[in-house]
Amino acid sequence: GQVSESYRIENYPGLSTTNGMDLATKFKEHAESLGVKTIEFLEVTEVKKTENGFNVKTDEATYFGRTLIFATGAKKRKLGLLNEDKFRGRGVSYCATCDGAFFIDKIVGVIGGGDSAVASALLLSEYAKKVYLIYRRKKDKMRAMPAWIERAENNEKIEMIFESVPKELKGEEKLESVVFDQNGKNIEIKLDGLFIEIGTVPESELAKKLGVSVNERGYIKVNEDMSTDVPGIFAAGDVTTGSNMLAQIVTACAEGAIAAESAYKYLKKEEYHENL
């Protein structure tokens, strides 16, 4: 998930600094040490309600559960520009951690004004010779933590450009430049790579097909116990409206713990009624 794509993590209790891949690996190893069976690299294609639970179908097998916890997270939001899909993997990327090393001594741009955008720019500065951090509003409207912004400002490889909105991705077989609208004037910047960090879209489609309610942005509505409005279905993490929409690893972990405990209580309650 998004944890593994995180460049540097400094807000997880007990760890002064770590990276996403290491933390994700530790999460997995810890769970497996407690007897959890992990099934990787399979896409869930369908989830169906049954008489006494849920069937989760993948390309290879179908798994049954009495309860279901959606921890499907969120995917990166696209710009929605022509050629965006054409140039994906040919200059356009949504993951600096995954693709940064392909741009050694190149010129790259990062679009966005949040923590992920600034963190991506900082990571890319370790590879690229020049990094443009481009935001559609003024500097004081950036959502990134001030400490991250200060780091970017003090990095000689990073140039910050404000009040600029991407309009066109140009190139033949790969990305060559990007045209921006800067206060009504077009500017074109030659780039070898463009990293898009403009927020996320919740992965809630499977939940919606089961009748689970979502808010106007598509996030799964949850109660304090992380239950949804469909009995037996719970949700946790970035896909939910929980924790006041604070999308951090620590809040996702907390929601996961609550969802697991709530699912357990739900099963015990069902078991009690079955035995009456």
Image: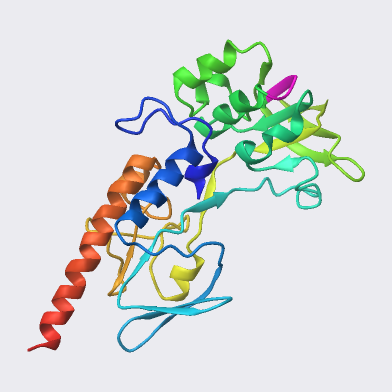
Residue 23 shown left or right of residue 265 in the figure: right
Q: Nearer the viewer, residue 213 or 106?
A: 106
* Quarter of image, res 179: top right
Q: Nearer the viewer, residue 271 or 209?
A: 271
Residue 142 percent coordinates (x, y): 52, 26
Residue 80 percent coordinates (x, y): 70, 49
Residue 122 percent coordinates (x, y): 59, 23
Residue 260 shown left or right of residue 237 in the figure: left
> For the image shown, how many numbered marks are present on the structure?
0
Q: Nearer the viewer, residue 268 or 23?
A: 23
Q: Residue at x 27, y 64 (%)?
A: 227
Q: Quadrant of the C terminus?
A: bottom left
* Quarter of image, res 231: bottom left
Q: Residue at x 38, y 70 (%)?
A: 212
Residue 39 percent coordinates (x, y): 47, 65
* Quarter of image, res 213: bottom left
Residue 74 shown left or right of residue 260 in the figure: right
Can the viewer see residue 4 in this picture?
Answer: yes
Q: Nearer the viewer, residue 207 or 262?
A: 262
Residue found at the very far left of the displayed protein: 276
Residue 126 shown left or right of residue 149 in the figure: right
Image height of 254 relative to 8, above or below: below
Image height of 197 relative to 140, above or below: below
Can the viewer see residue 184 in this picture?
Answer: no
Q: Residue at x 28, y 73 (%)?
A: 232
Q: What colour scheme has been applied to the protein in the rendered image?
A: rainbow
Residue 130, magenta (yes or no): yes
Q: Residue at x 11, y 81 (%)?
A: 272
Residue span colored magenta: 127-132
Image height of 167 relative to 125, above or below: below
